[in-house]
């Protein structure tokens, strides 16, 4: 699983010109699911996102987690995070999980997040044509991959 994590002051997902989900202070996470991802990838990524200390403390240092900052999570599926771009000019998405595999993994991520954290979660709609608005805070943007645990 690959995630692009953005610290935001606010973020929203609109579908068909209607706001579908919205958060204030928190994290906007774009989640790409690869064909060989599994429960261990979900658990590792949830732990990483939940515990990552990227919010400023009283001294202005990035020292607080999402939970400690009383933030929310906005989770948006994005298969294009697994694009292969080395050859030619047209990205290949053969590594991205097919919807029949990715949808249950996405739903399991949401379920496990709710079970494992007390941080509110909002979502986009898997496979929908979504418009994302955000006010990036910092800006702080990180890329995390469950297959590259550096």
Image (tube, grey):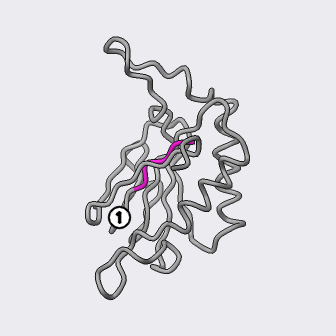
Q: Which residue is mark 1?
A: 8
- The furthest residue to the top: 88
Magenta highlight on residue 4: yes
Q: Position of residue 69 (x, y in %)?
A: 45, 79
- The furthest residue to the front: 150
Label 1 crowd (10 A; few <14 / some 14-19 / many >=20)? many
Question: Residue drawn 40% across and 20% down?
Answer: 91
| Figure quadrant of the N terminus | top right
Is label 1 in a helix, a strand or a loop? strand
Q: Position of residue 68 (x, y in %)?
A: 50, 80
Question: Residue drawn 55% across and 69% down?
Answer: 51
In the figure, is residue 66 to the left or right of 99? left
* Residue 77 position (above or below residue 35): below
Residue 19 figure quarter = bottom left
Question: Residue drawn 42% across and 52% down?
Answer: 13
Magenta residues?
Answer: 1-5
What secondary structure do most residues of the magenta stretch adopt?
strand
């Amino acid at each position: 699983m690959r995630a692009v994590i953005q610290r935001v002051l606010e973020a929203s997902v609109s579908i068909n010109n209607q706001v579908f989900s919205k958060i204030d202070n928190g994290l906007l996470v774009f989640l790409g699911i690869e064909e060989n991802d599994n429960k261990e990838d979900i658990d590792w990524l949830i732990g990483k996102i939940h515990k990552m200390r990227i919010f400023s403390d009283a001294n202005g240092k990035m020292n607080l987690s999402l939970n400690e900052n009383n933030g929310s999570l906005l989770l948006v599926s994005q298969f294009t995070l697994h694009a292969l771009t080395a050859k030619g000019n047209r990205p290949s998405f053969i590594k991205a999980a097919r919807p029949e595999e990715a949808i249950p993994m996405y739903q399991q991520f949401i379920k496990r997040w709710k079970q494992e954290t007390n941080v509110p979660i909002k979502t986009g709609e898997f496979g929908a044509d979504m418009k994302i608005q955000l006010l990036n805070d910092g800006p702080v943007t990180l890329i995390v991959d469950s297959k590259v645990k550096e």
